[in-house]
Image (cartoon, helix red, strand yellow):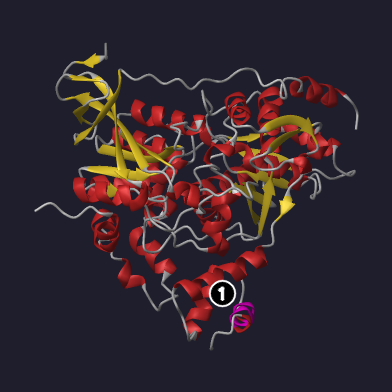
Amino acid sequence: MSEKCKKDDWVEIHYVVLEARERTGDIPEDTRKVPLECWIKGWAEKEGTVGEEVTIRTPANRYVKGTLTRINPEYTHTFGPCASELSAIGQELRATLKEGK
Amino acid sequence: MAKDTSYDAVMDRRAEIMSRALGLNYDEFIISDIAFDYEGMMAKAGYSLEEVRQIQSESGVGNTPLLELRNITDLARKTSKRGFGARILIKDEAANPSGSFKDRRASVSIHHAKKLGYPGVLAATSGNYGAAVASQAAMKNLGCIIVQEVFDSRHVGQPEIIEKSRKCEAYGAEVVQLTVGPELFYVSLILLEETGYFNASLYSPFGISGVETLGYELVEQIRARYDKDPAYIVVTHAGGGNVTGTARGALKAGAKNSTIIGASVDLSGLHMASDNDFNKKSFTTGHTGFGVPFATWPDRTDVPKNAARPLRYLDRYVTVTQGEVFYVTEALAQVEGMERGPAGNTSLAAAIALARELPEDEIVVVQETEYTGAGKHPWAQLDFAKQNGIAVKRGAPKENKPGKTIVIPQNFSQITATEMDLNRMRRSYIRNALERNKVKNVTEEDIRFLAEDTKTDADFVTSVIRDLGVRL
């Protein structure tokens, strides 16, 4: 069953700004082959289902229509796993500082 | 009746949209197809240095600490010839409210927007400037929209930019996240027209005058502590506002003999508007992908005349590799106890190499740091690089290949700065000024302007124009 949002839930929507054929000619070919897409977050104006069109009110009080993609969207970026290529640098530099020139 | 929002229609209206969104008539500064009254524009639109300092102090911006990097200086001296290795200082701009020097830029724009009665502000930026604008707008209770280029066509986002999205939202801004492409500007124009918001452009005189306090402050602080001026002021260079503002401030403080050196991460070979290349870079700012195009043609921005004109102020321009910046970021944390964001350490990596050129009693100052956090961290950025097929290893920095390999130096002595040919860039700029403005005859006024805009003289400009076959 598809996820549903209620009115005033914090949600994310998606829409296509420019189809590939509408894009400016002044860009690399690989970029020109794909649409210009947009994601915006805001509060749902009424209940809706993921994958269907909803209207949101954004933090700037604009009303924007798009396809509902996420409800209570989270951030998933992290500090990442330890970069082993960096892990010895501190020890190496401290050892160098202890040496005479 | 609803306005036509097709690409061509909006771009046709760009001049009137921008004029309304800045409250500034650029036409009054135009002298010819090439020349314009740069200082007149800065004076008319900007605020005096004293006014800017007052504006910034009211919003907690500026007066950031100047720190001596004793251990990094020691390491630089250990890898220099005897008696060489200048003292390395750093201006800790991460101490600003949103964590970077961009607060200086935003503070004046947002103050001005509030003064003129705009209901809100908009900025098109994927970098720290978005967070700065959102933070300042929150303080002034203004609406805020930040338009970002975040994803490639697979909906994979740069971790550094996603962190900026989060930070902007934390300050209450609406964040418009786009896929790759220069049409970011088109989207911004639509939103400016729809909302009546102020265009808090990175490239307006307001923003640049905000950075002047940084150059002024660091000279003041160095004089107070060391009773001399810095030999080198090393500035991370991307769009040019950092160089322009810092240099102007240093000059206003009277530091006429300090050498202004721009530093960028070398991302040569990667196209900034390419969907394929977008996630092949570990740095989303402070790199040559912005640094070179914006120096050689500044007027490619969201304002008719860019107030950020780096070639007016640069004495030298150097590059460092991604691997060197990651190494130096780790060094700063491990031996100086300062964990800061990688992009802000671009100029520090360059400064280490540059300090070796100077005697020990000279001063090299790095004019910025930035905050770090999830996504904006060497681990996150190196992990993302690996996910995008980029090899990461330790070795010789010269083995770095943007988009292919990131090489972390094996030791401190390997940190070097590669000199860029500024005269070549100056020639490119002059060629762009002539070609893009379709100039057939060049006037004395044009020559004078181009000489000022390239920090050269009439003879240099004339010889370039002759080489291009344009009539004088």
Q: Amino acid at mark 1?
A: Ala
From this view, report whether residue B184 is shown above or below residue A77.
below
Q: Residue furthest left?
A: B1
- Assess disc 1: are there few (<14), some (14-19) or many (≥20) residues with their C-alpha within 10 Å of its C-alpha: many
Q: Is residue B452 visible?
A: no
* Element on which disc 1 rests: helix
Location of residue A72 in the rendering, given as x and y in whole percent from the top left corner: 30, 17
Looking at the image, which is closer to me, B97 or A64? Answer: A64
Q: In the rendered view, tell whether residue B158 sits above or below residue A23.
A: above
Q: Quadrant of the N terminus of chain A?
A: top left
Q: Chain of mark 1?
A: B
Q: Is residue B121 left or right of residue B281?
A: left
Over which residues does the magenta segment extend? B459-465
Among the 4 quarters of the image, the one containing residue A34: top left
Position of residue B278 in the picture relative to residue B177 (left or right)? right
Q: Quadrant of the C terminus of chain A?
A: top right
Q: Is residue B287 visible?
A: yes
Residue at position x 57%, y 45% in the image: B286
Farthest top residue in view: A1
B350 or B33: nearer the eye? Answer: B33
Image x and y of residue A24, in percent: 38, 56
- Report the residue marked by disc 1: B451
Q: Which residue of the protein is positioned furthest toward the bottom in this rendering?
A: B472
List x then y, in percent, for residue A92: 81, 23
Q: Is residue A42 above or below residue B204?
A: above
Membership of B383 in magenta stretch: no
> Main structural element of the magenta stretch: helix, strand or loop?
helix
The residue under the point 64% across, 43% down is B347
| Residue B251 or residue B110, whichever sits in front | B110
Could you tell me residue B208's position as x and y percent? 44, 53
Q: Quadrant of residue B178?
A: top left
